[in-house]
């Protein structure tokens, strides 16, 4: 594993898991989980900090700080070693099964010696669980489902898949006569890049028609559980969906609860407690006499906790409570703020739509500017030539004269293993804008990859680094690089970093965005569209930006064209001066 912060975050998370498996104090488990998240997202390298420095990290106190120091001194932490000795690694792996909690995982190990998902699957097949306390036919069936889910992409689906399913269900349920409100909640409303299950919330005085409609939807392959106000189904695609029906008067409290995250909810409940109140999915109540304070709207719930309404993408206990208390919540960038797309393709390379169609679609969206950035010469599959590029430029200029939208001729350059690019500076100067991205040699060492990305930032013609980590969800891990060094270089050179909106990329991801913005980096939220319909992916990139706390001002494609043009030219000029 790479960066020391990530190493320590993984270690603290492991400790939290082990504590939970061995029946440790829930409060302690939570505090290690929080510390793991804080360390993982901290901007300074933790291996260089002393105890005082470590304690400046949110959620890190003396005891956790000392464990981190111990790790860097001796390469291990005694307390964690002790628990590791008691819990085989496979048991921790077992708890990743969505339908299996830590206690039952430990039971499977103790009773049957099962210490891996594969062993558990085998035990299920051969009926070894029969007669085991707590593992009746229903539980066994749940386990089977759980393993299936885990094997499909760690049990999570892309946000685009979940969103499409959720919007369909919400439309169907909203049409039920008794329904007064319906929306999706959970991780989907928080715009996480992947979703474990879809949580739908609906309000009605009488929930019967809602439940009936839900369980009979054509997309439902199986009703996993059903009660008067709750149901869980599995769709034909294998996606799990939960419906909760609530009376209209408690809509706000239920929405707040089921939006989560769990970590955020724990904080809001603590705040309620300090005010002599109790918060649940049924409302905000006075501790003394259980009388109701509010429940009808989310806004009112937050207000009575002394907080402004907090946008769902921020609700991860990553500082939003503190910011809300201080009146310092950011005004998040929205889809409506975006004035143009700066990374798109046509059928000249691997897109499926011709230039004219992509441009017409961009105009129909009301964009003020739009960049066409087909692949550059060094990607052999694409058979790009200088002549083809220049011919496309001519056609694009002609199209540009036919409307008010500013058309930019660009390219998506390939960052070579040494950080060099496809063309020399003279040819690059002919483009209005260049995106540069890594498309090969993903396995380079950390230092090579870091140097490579920094060198690309230093090229005066590179305005944007495309999909900087190169991860593909479920298929490819991010490259190993010292991202903080890359972020510093991007900020220093006036190079924007992309938030690629393509649902299996979402790159930079929320955590890297959070880290990059501390360096003063600017961002571009692009779709990397290869077809007209892909232009709609923008919402997922914006969701990721919101999870990274971005305001419109930090995103270059919310700017008017004149400001964006100055940004591009300033970098080119600075390089000319220094030469
Ligand atoms: P997912 O489905 O793994 O992508 O993530 P979520 O956040 O949608 O989680 P899920 O579906 O288990 O639960 C939906 C929301 O319900 C969650 O975000 C917060 C709330 N919730 C669920 N379980 C708990 C809990 O034990 N405590 C608290 N405070 N809230 C919970
Ligand atoms: Ca969920
Ligand atoms: Ca759920």
Image: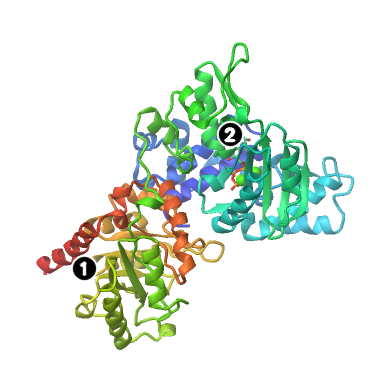
Residue most extreme to the top: 288
Q: Is mark 2 within 8 Å of ligand 1?
A: yes
Residue positioned most to the right: 131
- Left/right placement of residue 363 relative to residue 155 reads left
Looking at marks 1 and 2 on the same chain, the residue that comes earlier in the sequence is marked by 2
Q: Quadrant of ligand 2?
A: top right
Q: Secondary structure at mark 2?
A: helix
Q: Quadrant of the C terminus?
A: bottom left
| Whether residue 29 is visible | no
Q: Dot 1, crowdedness within 10 Å: few (<14), some or many (≥20)?
A: many
Question: Residue at horizontal 18%, vertical 64%?
Answer: 569
Residue bearing the label numbered 2:
257
Checking the image for residue 460, the label placed there is: 1
Q: Nearer the viewer, residue 207 or 562?
A: 207
Q: Where is residue 3? Give x, y as percent.
A: 42, 54
Q: Which mark is residue 200?
A: none
């Amino acid at each position: 594993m790479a960066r020391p912060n990530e190493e320590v975050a993984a270690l603290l998370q492991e400790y939290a898991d082990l504590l939970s498996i061995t029946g440790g104090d829930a409060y302690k488990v939570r505090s290690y989980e929080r510390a793991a998240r804080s360390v993982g997202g901290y901007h300074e390298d933790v291996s260089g900090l002393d105890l005082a420095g470590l304690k400046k990290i949110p959620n890190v106190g003396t005891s956790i700080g000392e464990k981190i120091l111990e790790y860097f001194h001796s390469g291990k932490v005694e307390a964690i070693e002790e628990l590791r000795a008691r819990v085989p690694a496979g048991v921790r792996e077992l708890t990743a099964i969505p339908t299996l909690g830590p206690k039952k995982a430990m039971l499977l190990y103790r009773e049957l010696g099962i210490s891996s998902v594969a062993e558990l699957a085998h035990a299920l097949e051969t009926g070894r669980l029969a007669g085991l306390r707590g593992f009746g036919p229903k539980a066994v069936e749940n386990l089977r489902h759980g393993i299936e889910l885990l094997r499909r992409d760690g049990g999570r689906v892309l946000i685009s898949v979940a969103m499409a399913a959720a919007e369909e269900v919400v439309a169907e349920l909203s049409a039920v006569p008794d329904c007064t409100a319906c929306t999706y909640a959970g991780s989907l409303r928080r715009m996480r890049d992947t979703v474990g299950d879809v949580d739908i919330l609906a309000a009605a005085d009488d929930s019967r028609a809602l439940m009936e409609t839900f369980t009979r939807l054509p997309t439902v392959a199986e009703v996993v559980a059903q009660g008067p106000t709750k149901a869980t189904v599995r769709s034909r695609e294998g996606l799990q969906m939960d419906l909760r029906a609530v009376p209209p008067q408690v809509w706000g409290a239920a929405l707040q609860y089921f939006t989560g995250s769990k970590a955020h909810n724990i904080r809001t409940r603590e705040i309620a407690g300090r005010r002599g109140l109790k918060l649940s999915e049924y409302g905000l109540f006075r501790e003394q006499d259980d009388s109701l304070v509010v429940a009808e709207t989310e806004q009112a719930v937050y207000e009575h906790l002394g907080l402004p309404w907090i946008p769902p993408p921020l609700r991860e206990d990553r500082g939003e409570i503190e910011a809300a208390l201080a009146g310092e919540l950011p005004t998040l960038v929205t889809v409506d703020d975006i004035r143009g797309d700066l990374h798109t393709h046509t059928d000249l390379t691997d897109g499926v739509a011709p230039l004219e169609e992509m441009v017409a679609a961009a105009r129909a969206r009301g964009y003020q500017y739009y960049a066409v950035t087909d692949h550059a010469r060094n990607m052999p599959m694409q058979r790009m030539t200088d002549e083809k590029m220049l011919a496309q430029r001519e056609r694009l200029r002609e199209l540009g004269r036919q409307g008010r939208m500013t058309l930019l001729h660009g390219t998506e350059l390939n960052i070579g293993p040494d950080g060099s690019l496809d063309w020399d500076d003279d040819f690059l100067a002919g483009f209005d804008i260049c995106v540069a991205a890594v498309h090969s040699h993903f396995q380079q060492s950390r230092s090579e990859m870091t140097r490579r990305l920094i060198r690309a930032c230093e090229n005066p013609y590179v305005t944007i680094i495309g999909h900087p980590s190169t991860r593909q969800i479920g298929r490819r891990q991010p490259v190993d690089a010292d991202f903080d060094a890359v972020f510093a270089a991007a900020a220093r050179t006036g190079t924007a970093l992309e938030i690629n909106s393509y649902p299996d990329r979402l790159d930079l991801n929320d955590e890297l965005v959070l880290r990059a913005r501390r360096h003063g980096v600017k961002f571009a939220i692009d779709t990397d569209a290869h077809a007209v319909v892909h232009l709609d992916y923008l919402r997922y990139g914006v969701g990721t930006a919101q999870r990274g706390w971005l305001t419109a001002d930090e995103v270059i494609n919310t700017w008017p064209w004149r400001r964006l043009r100055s940004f591009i030219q300033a970098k080119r000029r600075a390089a000319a001066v220094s030469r």
